[in-house]
Amino acid sequence: MNGPASPGPVADPALPSTESVIIKAWNTVLFDKFCRFRHLVVHGLSRHSEVAFERCAYPAGARLLDIGCGFGDTTVALAERVGPSGEAVGVDCAERFIEASRATAAQAGARNVRFEVRDVQQDTLGGPYDYAFARFGTMFFELPGAAMRNIRRALTPGGRLTQIVWRRREDNPWVHEAERCVTAIVPVVSHENTDAVHCGPGPFSMAGPDMVSALLVAAGFERICFERHDCDICIGRDLDEAVEFAMALGPAGEILRLAGDEAERLRPRVIAALRETLARFERPDGVRAPSSAWFITATNPA
Ligand SMILES: C[S@@+](CC[C@H](N)C(=O)[O-])C[C@H]1O[C@@H](n2cnc3c(N)ncnc32)[C@H](O)[C@@H]1O
C-alpha cells in the first residue's frame, strides 16, 4: 500500500445523512442481487471498461480514485496499469461492497490498492489523485452536483475524470426490453410512494449530454468530451437465467421489488412475457443483447 494514510469521512451536516435509503439499498438488497449475478455483472460491465482503459492509457506511477468501485475488479485492474509506484483507491458508500473489494484485491495479490467506505457526495476522498474513474458508479447520486464538485476537489490541477455511464434506455435493450415488458403488466410504484429502500435516480440519470456537461461545468470541470461505446452484453447463460436476471436487476427488477405482493401475484404473466421478449436475444453462447454507454472525460483546470 502506498500513499498517505487516508483521512476519515467528514460529513457536511447540510447534506443527506449517510443513512439515506439509497445507501441502505446498496448495502442490503442491491448488494445481495449483485452477488447473485456477479458473474454476469462483472463480465458485462468489463466489456465497456476494458475499452475505456485502452483509451485512457494511465501512466505508471499515477494515483487513481475508483468511484463506486463495487466488487473492486476495476480498482485492481487500474492498480495493475499504474504499477507498483502508483496506487488505486476504491471508494464505495456500501460497506459490504468494500469488504468484497478487499477480498477481490487479496485474491489477486494486489498490493498497491486500498479501499474505503465513502459517500462520494459528501465525504473526504483523500488524494490528490491524478485520475478519477467510475464504471457505472455515478448514476445513483441524489446530489450529483455535490458529488462532481467533491471529485474535482480530490484531483490534482490538470487531473482527469473518466466516467462510464449508460446512454439512453432505448439504446440499452439489455435492460430496457425487460423494463418495457414489466411496466406493461405491473403497476409502477414511484420512489415517493414507498418506504422501501431504492436505488435512487437510476441507471439512465446521466444519459443526457447537455444535462451532464452543464453539471460538470458547474462543478468546475473543463474540456468535457463524450465518446459513445456500444457492445452486446451477456444477460444469461440461458433463457432461464436471463429471465431471472431481468426480474432481479435493472429497472425491471426495481419495479418488481417495489410492487411487492402485486408483483408476486402477477409473476407467472411476467415470466411468460419476459421469456417471449428475451428469446430473440438467444445465441448459441448465451443470451446477448445490445448496450450503449458514454465514456465522459472532464479535466480539473490546471
Ligand atoms: C452499478 S454499481 C457499479 C459498481 C462497479 N463500479 C462496477 O462497475 O461493477 C454502482 C455502485 O455505486 C455505489 N454508490 C452509489 N452511490 C454512491 C455514493 N453516494 N458514494 C459512493 N458510492 C456509491 C454503489 O454502492 C455501487 O457499488
Image: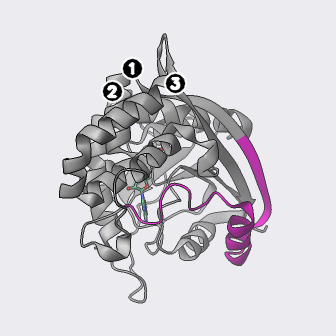
Report if residue 100 is visible in the image.
no
The residue stretch that appears in magenta: 199-228
Give the number of the disc on residue 24: none
Viewer-nearest of discs 3 and 1 = 3
| Residue in view at x 46 percent, y 32 percent | 277
Under tag 1, what secondary structure? loop
Residue identifier under label 3: 281
Front residue of 170 and 127? 170
- Asked whether disc 3 touches disc 1, contact meaning CB atoms under 8 Å apart, the reply is no
Q: Identify the residue position indicated by label 1 in the image.
A: 237
Q: Amino acid at mark 1?
A: Arg
- Gap in Å between the C-alphas at discs 3 and 1? 11 Å
User: Could you say where residue 111 lies in the image, as x and y percent from the top left?
Assistant: 42, 37
For the residue labelled by badge 3, is the local secondary structure a helix, a strand or a loop? helix
Q: Do labels 2 and 1 touch, CB within 8 Å?
A: yes
Residue 241 - label: 2
Q: Please determine whether, in this image, residue 108 is positioned above or below residue 202.
A: above
Within 10 Å of the Cα at label 2, are there few (<14), some (14-19), or many (20+) other Cα atoms? some
Q: Give whichever of 167, 161 is nearer the camera.
A: 167
Quadrant of ligand 1: it is bottom left
Q: Reply yes or no: does residue 22 show up in magenta.
A: no
Q: Quadrant of residue 48 in the image?
A: top right
Question: Which image quadrant is residue 80 in?
Answer: top right
Q: Spatial distance from mark 2 to mark 1, Cα to Cα?
A: 6 Å
Residue at 44% in and 37% down: 73
Q: Amino acid at mark 3?
A: Phe
Q: In the image as oriented, which residue stretches furthest toward the top?
A: 284
Secondary structure under tag 2 reads: helix
In the image, is 60 to the left or to the right of 105? right
- In the displayed orientation, state which residue is furthest to the right: 223
Q: Specify the amino acid type for callout 2.
A: Glu
